Amino acid sequence: MTDTTYELKVDLHGHDSNMRESLRVALRNSGFLQFVESCPDYKEHNPSYATESELVPQDMSRLSVYSFSKDELEGAKAVAESVAGFSCEISQMDTTVWQEGWKESFQPLFAGRFYVQAPWHKAEVPDRSVSICIDPGMAFGTGQHATTHVCLQLLSELAAADLEKPILDCGSGSGILSVAVRKLGGQKIVATDIEADAMLAIAENCKRNNVEGVELSRESVPKGSYGLIMANILTPVLLELLPQFVEALEPGGKILFSGVLYEQKDDFAKETKKHGLSILNAVTREGWLGLLMEKV
Ligand SMILES: C[S@@+](CC[C@H](N)C(=O)[O-])C[C@H]1O[C@@H](n2cnc3c(N)ncnc32)[C@H](O)[C@@H]1O
């Protein structure tokens, strides 16, 4: 870690969901796999934004990419500017200030049956909630992002029998979904991610939650027969991995997809149907869609 952290801020105002998706795809294709979408204006005026009762209709207005290397962010800036002229700015900050600022904005939250907090939070876990403690480090998955939130909501509605067979958490990031299913009673869990930072974060967060036995892999879909697959990744990656998911899912098995924009729901449903998946449940939040499907 170095003393200075750089942030590329991409202004999303005035760009529709298709343009925003083109931006995500272009960044991903250029090797920028981790970015944060936020609504800075909204948070400033609504300190209670992370409570269960508020289903916030907020419009993400900024996409940020963080790096210790300014040159790397200049590359990301060029990519973003080449996609229909997104307006961008690179700023720098002291790494410790960035980490502390990030901690301030991370508030405990409810998502379905889960109560998610960070190690520095001291709040008591509300009755009947399943507690998850997460420090994502450099990996994705605090629970604050809508795509993770919808996963936790959908997982909350699963029956115990859905968790009896092996479970794959593909694109595990911080390991938040692996911890969640383990706490609901899942026994055999494989957490995968292509990022080395994620491997560290998953292991640490499992330990932090007294969760044992989660197997780690850098291979997206390790061979196996899974009763449940969870995948919160960008839509193009989900579609790329779809044949592998379906092959690895046992008949009658369930698959949880997140990372799909609401506008893409029909196309996504069409593709998954071609592969023999049918929709069981769906949740939307902030323009994102979480889908629980079954292999028929
Ligand atoms: C949106 S984050 C989801 C993190 C966490 N599962 C959650 O729900 O908050 C997506 C994660 O997928 C990982 N990823 C991207 N492409 C992948 C691939 N082809 N195979 C496995 N993981 C991938 C990224 O590194 C990132 O950690």
Image: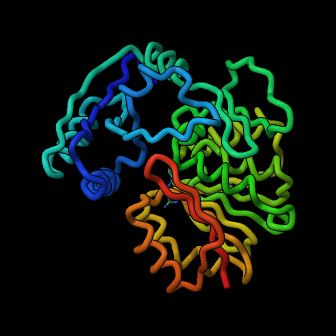
Note whether residue 197 is visible: no
Q: Is residue 196 left or right of residue 75?
A: right
- Report if residue 39 is visible in the image: yes
Q: Quadrant of residue 185?
A: bottom right
Q: Residue 90 at x, y = what percent?
A: 24, 27
- Residue in the picture at 42% in, 39% down: 58
Where does the image place residue 55, in percent across and percent down from the top left? 55, 41
Residue ID at (42%, 44%): 34
Q: Quadrant of residue 293?
A: bottom right
Q: Is residue 18 left or right of residue 144?
A: left
Is 3 above or below relative to 199? Answer: above
Is 108 drawn above or below residue 210 in the view shown? above
Residue 48 location (% of width, % of height): 56, 23
**Which quadrant: the C terminus?**
bottom right
Between residue 51 and residue 172, name the one nearer to us. 51
Task: Check the image and name the residue furthest to the front.
Answer: 53
Is 25 left or right of 223, judged from the image as shown? left
Q: Quadrant of residue 205?
A: top right
Q: How many marks?
A: 0
**Residue drawn at (43%, 51%), measured in percent from left and top?**
287
Give whichever of 175, 290 is nearer the camera.
290
Q: Nearer the viewer, residue 44 or 9?
A: 44
| Image location of residue 126, percent across then percent down | 80, 29
In the image: residue 155, left or right of residue 54: right
Q: Give the image's coloring scheme.
A: rainbow
Q: Residue at x 68, y 36 (%)?
A: 110
